[in-house]
Amino acid sequence: MKKRTKFSLKKSTGEYLWSYQHPQIEHPQGITLDKHGFIYIACNRNNSIEVASSVGKTSRTILSESDGIKCPVGINIDRESGLMIVSTMIINDRDNRTYRTAFVYKI
C-alpha cells in the first residue's frame, strides 16, 4: 500500500482549515496557489503536477511524464499572468544524461 502524503491548511493565526490526502500526491516538492485558490502540487515520485480544489475535496493530474514532467522539484504561478513555471528534469537522447530545466505553461 502506498504511503499517502497529507496536507493540512491553516490560517496565519494557526486556525485549522482543512487537510487533504490522496495517493497521487507522492513526495511533494513544491506547492503554489493560483488566483482562484486552486492548489498546485509538484509530485516528485510520480512525475506529475496535481491540482486540488481550494477546499481539498477534489484533485486531478494536469501534467504528467507524457507531458515532459520528470521528477519535478519546484512550481510557482504568477497570479496576474496565469503563467506556471515547473522545475523538472529532462534526459538528453544523444548521451542519456539528465539535466534540470524549467517549463512554462499558461493556466
Image: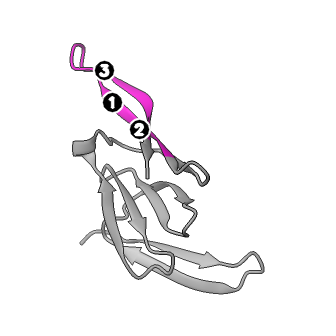
Q: CA distance from mark 2 to mark 3?
A: 14 Å
Question: Please, what secondary structure does the residue beneath circle 3 have?
Answer: loop
Q: Which residue is mark 3?
A: 97
Q: Which residues are magenta?
A: 84-104
Question: Please, what secondary structure does the residue beneath circle 2 have?
Answer: strand
Tell me which amino acid carries mark 1. Ile
Pointer 3 and pointer 1: residues touching (CB < 8 Å)?
no
Q: Which residue is mark 2?
A: 88
Up the image or down, 45 lies above or below 58; here it is above
Q: How many callouts does the rendering have?
A: 3
Q: Which residue is mark 1?
A: 90
Question: Please, what secondary structure does the residue beneath circle 1 have?
Answer: strand
Q: Residue at x 61, y 52 (%)?
A: 80
Q: Main secondary structure of the magenta part?
A: strand
Q: Which label's residue is closer to the chain start, 3 or 1? A: 1
Q: Is residue 28 left or right of residue 77?
A: left
Q: CA distance from mark 3 to mark 1?
A: 8 Å
Q: Nearer the viewer, mark 3 or mark 1?
A: 1
Q: Residue at x 65, y 78 (%)?
A: 10
